[in-house]
Image (tube, rainbow, N blue to C red):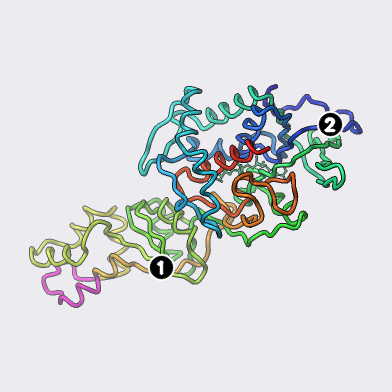
């Protein structure tokens, strides 16, 4: 069967009931992976999605190249209320397994900094691989499909789903032994993200932890908002830290706040009211450098310009003035200044919200599902995988690796 965006199957007749072994809600990264795995295991699998096309997030991720996994994946790369939850799935389906899959399909990919793997050409090549896998596994994928209700059948087991084909405005009813919720989370509503997974979890009595935007720019108010906006487009390497988290990556000034990998990473750990500390001279002992400048008589501006973009040097010295020749600057003041350079403290006002967030923190409480099968403890036959769960990866391909690993673990258990 073909993974189709136009669905020619079965639902023109509204009152016929289709029977499936598994219905997966969400044709995204985890849903397609789970579907192919279960299909290869001999299950009759239907994947439903309300979007016009499958896997929209893969298509636009990583600037259109999709950072699909990472060479080093450990449980420490994930945020989850139960830090042990991710271990089983990640160890059973490591990044090497996904790399082996894409290599089998001849995907051209490249390794970038910090072990991040990206498609060399287009992220859509990866979608094609998942489509092909689903096709080979006999999976049916139906887009443009709205899920109206899910009802458990307590006596005979399984579920009845009421759906609407939104292209043809036809309505139909499905029966299935098992339902997998792979509908993702709240980030990027313009790509058809929705809170359906949380609603379903609550309907079946599962706890859902508070959600918030993750891997998202941080925004500012007042003078810092204007100062940051004036530097829009400037990027520099920093070490950003917040609470116990610390990331040595690039930071980007935008018209709307601070972004770039360092800030996106920090946003996963930052809470309103907390400071973010930024070391603007990573790898250097700032006080030693300033003392060298003082002793040699070299200009601070010239030295900073060798380290930073000129626009940033100019702005920094306006915000935090100091004599450009350090010869007459007392050591005490020099030490204060070194501290500013390595521990620039900013208080973001907020995050840029779900519309700009790559992921959603929080979600379905992992205590509610098995870490081996992803089945809900309170509702046999109901499964939750991917981002709908309270599992959030750091930046670097970890979120897709979680989607693949949880999808495969669940698919094998169906
Ligand atoms: P995913 O979001 O992939 O799929 C959910 C599916 O469910 C969608 O197809 C959606 O249409 C469907 N759905 C939702 N509500 C529904 C409803 N009510 N009815 C029916 N269907 C419904 N990660 C990474 O590792 N590397 C990267 O490079 C990036 N880059 C990136 C960029 C941007 C802009 C974003 C927004 C996100 C990323 N990510 C990322 C994160 C990554 O995309 C994300 O973690 C995974 O896609 C999650 O996979 P899921 O299968 O859980 O959800």
Q: Which of marks 1 and 2 is in front?
A: 2
At label 1, counting other C-alpha atoms closer than 10 Å, the crowd grade (few under 14, some 14-19, many 20 or more) is few
**Residue at image coords 86%, 42%:** 156
Residue 323 covered by magenta stretch: yes
The rendered magenta stretch, by its main secondary structure, is classed as helix
Q: Mark yes or no: residue 361 visible.
A: yes
Region in magenta: 322-337
**Residue at image coords 44%, 69%:** 347
Q: Where is residue 184 in the image (x, y as percent from the top left)?
A: 63, 46
Residue 317 relative to residue 8: left or right: left
- In the picture shown, does residue 28 fall above or below 221? above
Residue 338 covered by magenta stretch: no
Residue 413 relative to residue 147: left or right: left
Q: Where is residue 302 in the image (x, y as percent from the top left)?
A: 18, 57
Between 362 and 336, which is closer to the camera in this rendering?
A: 362
Ligand 1 quadrant in view? top right
Give the numbered dot on residue 346: 1
Q: Mark 2 points at which residue?
A: 18
**Residue at image coords 74%, 57%:** 202
Between 359 and 177, which is closer to the camera in this rendering?
A: 177
Q: Quadrant of residue 366?
A: bottom right
């Amino acid at each position: 069967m073909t993974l189709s965006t136009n669905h020619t199957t079965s639902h023109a007749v509204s009152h016929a009931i289709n029977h499936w072994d598994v219905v997966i809600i969400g044709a995204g990264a985890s849903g397609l992976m789970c579907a192919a795995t279960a299909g290869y295991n001999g299950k009759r699998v239907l994947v439903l999605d309300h979007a016009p096309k499958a896997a929209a997030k893969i298509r636009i991720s990583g600037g259109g190249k999709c950072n699909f996994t990472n060479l080093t994946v450990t449980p420490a790369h994930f945020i989850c209320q139960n830090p042990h939850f991710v271990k089983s799935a990640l160890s059973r389906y490591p990044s090497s397994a996904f790399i082996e899959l894409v290599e089998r399909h001849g995907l051209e990919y490249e390794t970038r900094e910090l072990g991040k793997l990206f498609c060399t050409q287009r992220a859509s090549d990866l979608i094609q691989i998942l489509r092909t896998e689903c096709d080979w596994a006999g999976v049916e994928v139906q887009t443009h499909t709205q899920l109206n209700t899910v009802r458990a059948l307590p006596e005979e087991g399984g579920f009845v789903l009421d759906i609407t084909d939104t292209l043809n405005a036809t309505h139909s009813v499905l029966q299935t032994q098992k339902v997998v919720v792979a509908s993702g989370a709240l980030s990027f509503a313009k790509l058809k993200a929705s809170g359906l997974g949380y609603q379903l979890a609550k309907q079946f009595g599962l706890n859902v932890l508070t959600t918030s935007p993750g891997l998202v720019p941080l925004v500012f108010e007042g003078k810092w908002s204007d100062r940051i906006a004036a530097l829009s487009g400037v990027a520099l390497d920093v070490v950003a830290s917040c609470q116990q988290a610390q990331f040595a990556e690039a930071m980007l000034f935008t018209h709307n706040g601070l972004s770039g990998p360092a800030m996106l990473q920090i946003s996963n750990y930052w809470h309103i009211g907390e400071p973010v500390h930024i070391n603007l001279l990573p790898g250097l002992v700032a006080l030693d450098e300033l003392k060298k400048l003082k002793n040699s008589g070299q200009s601070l501006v010239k030295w900073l310009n060798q380290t930073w973009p000129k626009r940033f040097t100019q702005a920094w010295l306006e915000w935090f003035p100091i004599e450009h020749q350090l010869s007459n600057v007392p050591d005490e003041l020099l030490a204060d200044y070194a501290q500013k350079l390595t521990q620039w403290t900013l208080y973001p006002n907020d995050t840029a919200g779900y519309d700009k967030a790559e992921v959603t923190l929080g979600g379905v409480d992992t205590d509610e599902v098995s870490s081996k099968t992803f089945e809900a403890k309170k509702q046999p036959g109901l499964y939750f995988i991917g981002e709908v769960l309270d599992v959030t990866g750091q930046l670097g391909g970890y979120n897709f690796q979680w989607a693949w690993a949880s999808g495969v673990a669940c698919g094998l258990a169906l």
